[in-house]
Structure formats: structure tokens, C-alpha cells
Amino acid sequence: MLELHCHTTFSDGSLTPQQLVNRAVAKGVKALAITDHDTISGWEEARSAAAPHGLEIVPGIELSTTYNGRSMHILGFYPDPHKLEAPLQERINGRHRRAQKMVEKLGELGYPIELPPMSGNMAPGRPHVAKAMHAAGYVTSVQEAFQRFLGDHGPAYVPYEKFTAQEGIDLLKSCGAVPVWAHPYLFHGGVVEEVLPELVKDGLMGVEVYHPQHSSSEERVLEELCEKYGLVMTGGSDYHGPQSKPKASDVDLNGLNLSLGLLDRVKQAATDLKRKG
Ligand code: AMP
Ligand code: ZN
Ligand code: FE
Ligand code: FE
């Protein structure tokens, strides 16, 4: 019923917002968050596409930040788009610069590629680079491009431009958005039980408990931690579109079968934040 983590062609998803909405409707989703990496450009098309079907679009984003020097993703729900626009453009510009740096590194390694043209409101990421390598015939799959070149220790890897989790949380809250730590068990810079209390001190309000790459025992731990720290719980399939070579953990839209009731506390938290101003 509920999907709170999805990507479109405005970042590294393979479906347009219109196509994503069509698929969500077909799969029985009742409320769908659009959470592209560092861009909110997909909302408008998603809303127009969803309206005739009575599908609720939850405005969202997945911010790329760093914590302990490693990549950390922070979801934000219900940001005020006007307040977010200018600071976000700087993040998107940083993603364009970073993609170009990866292209330069690959060129120096003997693998020249060209990225597809991307407009200034789209957020390029490593999957775009990986797909270009595949298209050029250097690798047999996107997965191989990550394994050999683009993974966190790969020779063509370039980290995000500096933007700390604290800065991300502050930005989201200043725009009225509920900051939620995305897929905590995919974080490589520390232990969940130790990092989470620090993030709570920094103003974090929620945790993405339900994610295809979390085991059920990890989800139980996160549920308990949310209880302990009074945090909002979210979840979603982190859907990037149909995959030619799906990972074992990949799930389709609505694959986690989450209850719509989870959304109530997210909405309440967003309302409380805006009331506090
Ligand atoms: P970026 O934010 O540009 O560093 O790219 C991160 C995105 O790349 C993630 O959100 C995933 O969608 C994708 N990704 C990360 N690791 C892999 C991998 N090993 N194989 C395929 N896609 C990956
Ligand atoms: Zn992604
Ligand atoms: Fe993520
Ligand atoms: Fe994601």
C-alpha cells in the first residue's frame, strides 16, 4: 500500500515519474513518495500523472551527505520546495562536477566515455557512469563497472563534495522536512547502535526501518531503536525501475507491503515541524 523510497529518471531511476506512477497504480500502491537523489524535479510530473488515479504523492528527497568520511543518505519528507530550491541546486551542480571527475579518471585509465546529456535539474550519479561504461563495451554489466571501477575503493571513484549529515539534517528541517536516515545497515562508516544516537543529537527525526537490503532481525533492532529514541519509522523498496540483472534483494513496487498507517506519523512530524517554524 505504501512506498516511501523510489527513484525516477531525474536521478538514477530508469522510469520517468509518469511510468513510475503507472506501475505503482498497477501494483496497488496508495501513497507513493518520490525520493530522487538530491533533486525534487520529479514531483510535478508524478502529481499530474497520479491525480486521475487517486494515488497520493508524498513529496520527498534522498540527500547525499557524508558522515565519518563515508556516504550517508538522508531522506526528507514534505520539504517546502521554494526554500529547498536554491541550496539544492548547489548539491545538483556538485553531482555534475563529480560525474565529470569520474569521466576524467576513467579517461586517464584508458576508458574514455561520454555521459548522456543531462539537464541542470537532473542529478547524475555513479549508475549513469556505469551505464555509459557498459554502453561503450568496457564491462559486461553495470554491476561489473561498480566492482572494478566505481565502488567506494575503485580507481574511478569520486566521493560526494563535502556536505555533512548534520548540514543535511539542518537543511531539511529548515525547509520543514522530516529527516530520516535511509537504509542504516548499508552505511559503512560506523555501527548503527553508535551512530544513531549521534544523529538523534544532530536532530534526526526518523529511520528507514523497512528496506529490501535489511534482514528481518535488523528491522527488529531498528524498530526497538525507534521506540527508544521516539523516532518516526519509514520504509520503501528503493525502487530504481525494472532491472535487466536483478540483485537477489531487489523487490518491486509495493514488494514490502507496508501499511499506510506508517505515513500518519510522518505527516504529524512534518506538521509539528512547520508549526514550530
Ligand atoms: P551515487 O549516489 O552517485 O554514489 O550512486 C549511488 C547509487 O548507485 C545507489 O543509490 C545505487 O542506486 C547504486 N549502486 C550502488 N552500488 C551499486 C552496485 N554495486 N551495483 C549497482 N548499483 C549500485
Ligand atoms: Zn539510487
Ligand atoms: Fe540510498
Ligand atoms: Fe535510494
Image (spheres, helix red, strand yellow):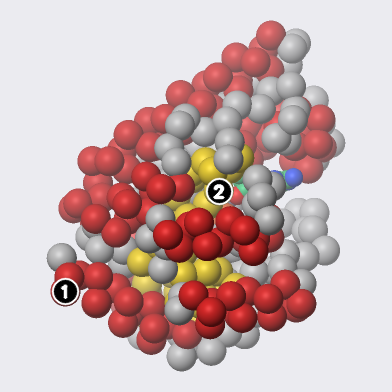
Task: Pinpoint residue 193: horizontal percent, then vertical percent.
Answer: 64, 64
Q: Could you classify mark 2 by the number of other residues whose Cα lies within 10 Å: few (under 14), some (14-19), or many (20 or more)?
A: many
Answer with mark 1 or mark 2, whichever residue precedes in sequence: 2
Pointer 1: what residue?
275
Quadrant where the image shows the C terminus: bottom left
Q: As drawn, is 116 to the left or to the right of 164?
A: right
**Image mark count:** 2
37 or 184: nearer the viewer: 184
Task: Pinpoint residue 150: horizontal percent, then vertical percent.
Answer: 71, 32
User: Residue at coordinates 39% horizontally, 83% vertically from top-left?
Assistant: 265
Which amino acid, by three-letter code, is at mark 2? Met
Measure the C-alpha gap from mark 1 to mark 2.
28 Å
Q: Could you classify mark 1 by the number of other residues whose Cα lies within 10 Å: few (under 14), some (14-19), or many (20 or more)?
A: few
- Please give the label number shown on residue 234: none
The reply to whether residue 206 is visible in this rendering is yes
- Please give the label number shown on residue 72: 2
* Depicted 58 relative to depicted 195: above or below: below
Query: Which of the 4 image quarters holds residue 28?
Result: bottom right
User: Residue at coordinates 53% horizontally, 79% vertically from top-left?
Assistant: 228
Q: As drawn, is 144 to the left or to the right of 191?
A: right
